[in-house]
């Protein structure tokens, strides 16, 4: 992965300038052939999750029954249409994230959140294991106001579960999604294209009590 220059998030004034033109991608999911671009089927919901390097994180979710499609990208910062290299400097403010589109009649948000919490260590601040930098921070970006109570409940319950095991406090950032920028084509479904590629997912071993 690219080196990290700063663990401090930039301000809107100090963030990289970025560009008006989005990164061009095919828009087709390499694994299931569905469109990663909106519009999505009626009744489907979206959530954006960051749990370290987005390669392994995306595979976790595309393999879950009820998940319609996934895509990796950048969110939570200031730089419009950032590149991977820019995001890895720490000067865009973005985290590496997975955009998850799911059918709520097949899988609920609590189930997705359980997978999210158990697949990484959400107590580590600006890092995830050996991956150090603000782009690897734990984040949840909601796409509708009804999601927030469920997210807050899961945050509180997992924080309590971790503290009971002396594993520290949850540092996961929770906020409404402001913008999601698709990552470059070679990052999309990376581990399907490169089965021996790097996957940094490593949970705490503490079960999530979300119901």
Image (cartoon, helix red, strand yellow):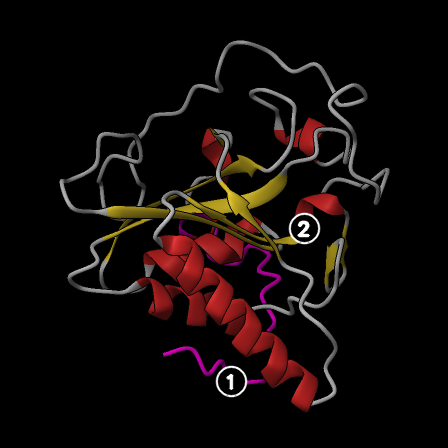
Q: Is residue 15 above or below residue 170?
A: above
From the viewer's side, name the closer residue of 111 and 135: 111
Q: Residue at x 78, y 38 (%)?
A: 9
Disc 2 designates what residue? Answer: 136
Give the tally of numbered discs: 2
Q: Determine which of the numbered discs, if any, sits on residue 156 in the image.
A: none
Taking the image as shown, residue 169 lies to the left or right of residue 105, namely right
From the viewer's side, name the closer residue of 118 and 190: 118
Picture coordinates of residue 40, whole percent (x, y):
21, 36
Q: Residue at x 30, y 40 (%)?
A: 29
> Which quarter of the figure has residue 112?
bottom left
Q: Residue at x 59, y 68 (%)?
A: 120
Residue 128 shows up from this direction? yes
Give the extent of the magenta segment: 192-211
Disc 1 designates what residue? Answer: 207
Picture coordinates of residue 28, whole percent (x, y):
28, 33
Q: Is disc 1 placed on a helix, strand or loop?
A: loop
Instruction: List the single residue furthest toward the top.
Output: 20
> Which quarter of the figure has residue 38?
top left
Picture coordinates of residue 154, whole percent (x, y):
48, 70
Taking the image as shown, residue 7 lies to the left or right of residue 136, namely right
> Which quarter of the figure has residue 13?
top right
Q: Is disc 2 placed on a helix, strand or loop?
A: helix
- Residue 171: say if magenta: no
């Amino acid at each position: 992965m690219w080196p990290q220059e700063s663990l401090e998030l930039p301000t809107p004034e100090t963030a990289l300038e970025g560009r008006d033109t989005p990164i061009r991608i095919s828009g087709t999911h390499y694994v299931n052939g569905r469109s990663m671009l909106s519009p999505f089927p009626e009744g489907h919901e979206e959530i954006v999750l960051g749990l370290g390097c987005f390669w392994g994180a995306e595979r976790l979710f595309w393999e879950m029954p009820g998940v319609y499609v996934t895509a990796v990208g950048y969110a939570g910062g200031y730089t419009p249409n950032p590149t991977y290299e820019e995001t890895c400097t720490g000067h865009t403010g973005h985290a590496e994230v997975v955009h998850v589109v799911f059918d709520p009649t097949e899988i609920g948000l609590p189930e997705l959140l359980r997978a999210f919490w158990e697949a990484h260590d959400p107590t580590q601040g600006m890092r995830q294991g050996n991956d150090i930098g603000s782009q690897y921070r734990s984040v949840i970006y909601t796409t509708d106001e009804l999601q927030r109570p469920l997210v807050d409940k899961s945050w509180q319950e997992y924080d309590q579960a971790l503290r009971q095991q002396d594993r520290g406090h949850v540092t996961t950032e929770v906020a409404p999604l402001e913008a999601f920028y698709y990552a470059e084509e070679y990052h999309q479904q990376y581990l399907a294209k490169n089965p021996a590629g790097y996957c940094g997912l490593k949970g705490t071993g503490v079960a999530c009590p979300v119901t």
